[in-house]
């Protein structure tokens, strides 16, 4: 969006008003692929019967089905893979306003990112091997602080991608094939981007990447994520910094100490564990098990006493026995996570698990998923209840999505978009509520997942 806007394109979120429609796709699991294809077909109607002149498909689906998209959906004019973001202008048929002189303001400076990716490609880090052959190379693109960017989030909150790709071999996952091998952005590049975002009004930074805890390893940086968090917390106007998607065995003492060391680094850890039965974790090519995880969780709680823990599990992985599932349920009861997401396994062509035997019927997978969520619901209810009367900083987000009589917001226990809701049902007279402002609040009531608070 940043590249297009800087080149002079006027952006609209309303497809019916657009001359060029860009569809950014996901191909992580079957249902996401289906949703992406449905969206392409829906948007194609704007080209056949509406105003749109061009239809561009971008993102992971392109990495996966480049040839098929072009062949089977003739309305699509161009495709842009995850490593070809710079090609978006040509794909959209937009000529940059000031192409002649490559100044710091020119879209062409982002070639630095390309140069960085290419330099690593020359060291042989990126090759697709025997993957479906549709694309010659794995994507190696990395954006940097000079890449123009438009926030799709509210102006007080921004995600920053600190690394791209993944080198882990999880058997259910095709992300490494879609996003390429792990590569970190330069430390200074992330800081420069964060400082610019904060200068424009951002107060909350959420660091993302397929594996944030490996940040810096490929640059020879030890404790890269801890150093990055500490440096970001020193930016004066930053209020909250957090990171998502930690890999379990990469959560080090140093990282936990960094979290504990600063009020601005949210005491929040999102560690997708995927399962707890050692047998299943071995089949998933992830290793470890409930005992190791429980020790690791105890350590997290010891070093960061008020830590909020989020995790994700896949249930119904091929070969998961009733006993394995019971082990997972017992582990969830013992670990008492604050937030938990459970996904039913879905077969993914190209992933190693696709070839595994002992697949479970969809109905059984869904039964197990619901059972696990039911267990978590009770845990969540109990943990939320224990918060009544406690005080927290609250980031106001705007009128409630359910009723415009109330406002809603988030505490440091709530990452953007994924965790429960905090409803504000009382505020001192005369106080002006504005999205993006921070207030002190007290929890007055709790639900299974949500909180009600009064602003103090
Ligand atoms: S660590 Fe995450 S992105 Fe990497 S292979 Fe495993 S599930 Fe996929």
Image (spheres, rainbow, N blue to C red):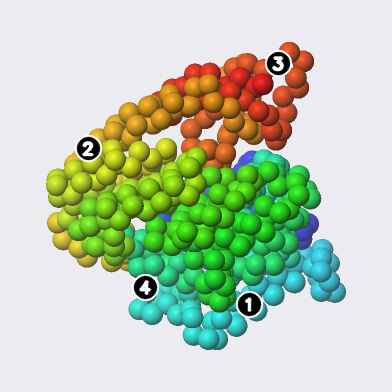
Residue farthest to the front? 302
Separation (CA) of disc 1 from disc 4: 26 Å
Of residues 287 and 159, the one nearer the viewer is: 287
User: Height in image: 415 above or below 423?
Assistant: below
Callout 3 touching callout 1 (CB < 8 Å): no
Q: Earlier in the sequence, mark 3 or mark 1?
A: 1
Answer left or right for 76 relative to 188.
Answer: left
Q: Indicate which disc, 4 or 3, sits on the residue closer to the N terminus.
A: 4
Horizontal and vertical percent position of residue 14: 64, 41
Q: Which residue is mark 1?
A: 116
Residue identifier under label 3: 428
Q: Which mark is residue 132?
A: 4
Q: Residue at x 52, y 60 (%)?
A: 254
Q: In the rendered image, which residue does mark 2 sit on?
A: 367
Residue drawn at (85%, 74%) of the image: 101
Measured in 3D between alpha carbons, the distance from the residue under mark 2 to the one under mark 1, in whole angstroms, is 47 Å
**Front label number (3 vs 1):** 3
Which class describes the residues within 10 Å of circle 2: few (<14), some (14-19), or many (20+)? few
């Amino acid at each position: 969006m940043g590249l297009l806007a800087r080149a002079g394109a006027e952006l609209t979120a309303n497809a019916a008003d657009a001359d060029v429609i860009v569809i950014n796709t996901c191909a992580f699991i079957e249902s996401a692929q289906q949703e992406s294809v449905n969206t392409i077909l829906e948007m194609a109607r704007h080209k056949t019967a509406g105003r749109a002149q061009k239809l561009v498909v971008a993102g992971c689906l392109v990495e996966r089905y480049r040839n098929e998209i072009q062949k089977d959906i003739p309305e699509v004019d161009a495709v842009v893979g995850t490593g070809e973001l710079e090609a978006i202008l040509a794909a959209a048929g937009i000529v940059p306003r000031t192409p002649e002189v490559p100044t710091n303001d020119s879209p062409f400076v982002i070639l630095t990112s390309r140069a960085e990716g290419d330099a690593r490609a020359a060291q042989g880090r990126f090759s697709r091997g025997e993957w479906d052959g549709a694309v010659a190379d794995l994507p190696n693109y990395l954006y940097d602080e000079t890449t123009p960017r438009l926030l799709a989030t509210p102006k007080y909150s921004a995600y920053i991608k600190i690394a791209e790709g993944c080198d882990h071999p999880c058997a259910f996952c095709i992300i490494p094939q879609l996003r390429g091998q792990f590569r970190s952005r330069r430390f200074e590049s992330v800081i420069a981007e964060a400082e610019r975002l904060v200068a424009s009004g951002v107060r909350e930074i959420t660091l993302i990447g397929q594996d944030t805890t490996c940040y810096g390893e490929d640059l020879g940086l030890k404790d890269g994520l801890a150093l990055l968090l500490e440096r970001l917390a020193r930016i004066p106007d930053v209020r909250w910094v957090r990171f998502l998607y930690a890999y379990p065995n990469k959560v080090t003492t140093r990282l936990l100490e960094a979290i504990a060391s600063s009020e601005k680094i949210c005491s929040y850890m999102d560690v997708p564990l995927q399962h707890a039965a050692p047998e299943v974790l071995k089949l998933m090519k992830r290793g470890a098990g409930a005992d190791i995880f429980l020790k690791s969780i105890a350590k997290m709680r010891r070093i960061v006493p008020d830590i909020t823990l989020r995790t994700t599990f896949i249930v119904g992985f091929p070969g998961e026995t009733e006993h394995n599932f019971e082990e997972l349920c017992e582990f969830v009861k013992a670990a008492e996570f604050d937030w938990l997401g459970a996904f039913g396994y879905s077969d993914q062509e190209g992933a190693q698990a696709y070839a595994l035997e002992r697949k479970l019927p969809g109905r059984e997978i869904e039964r197990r998923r619901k059972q696990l969520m039911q267990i978590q619901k009770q845990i969540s209810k109990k943990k939320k209840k224990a918060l009544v009367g406690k005080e927290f900083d609250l980031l106001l987000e705007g009128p409630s999505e359910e009723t415009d009589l109330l406002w809603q917001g988030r505490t440091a226990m709530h990452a953007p978009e994924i965790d429960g809701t905090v409803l504000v049902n009382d505020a001192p007279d005369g106080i002006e509520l504005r999205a993006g402002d921070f207030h002190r609040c007290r929890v007055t009531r709790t639900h299974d997942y949500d909180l009600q608070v009064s602003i103090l």
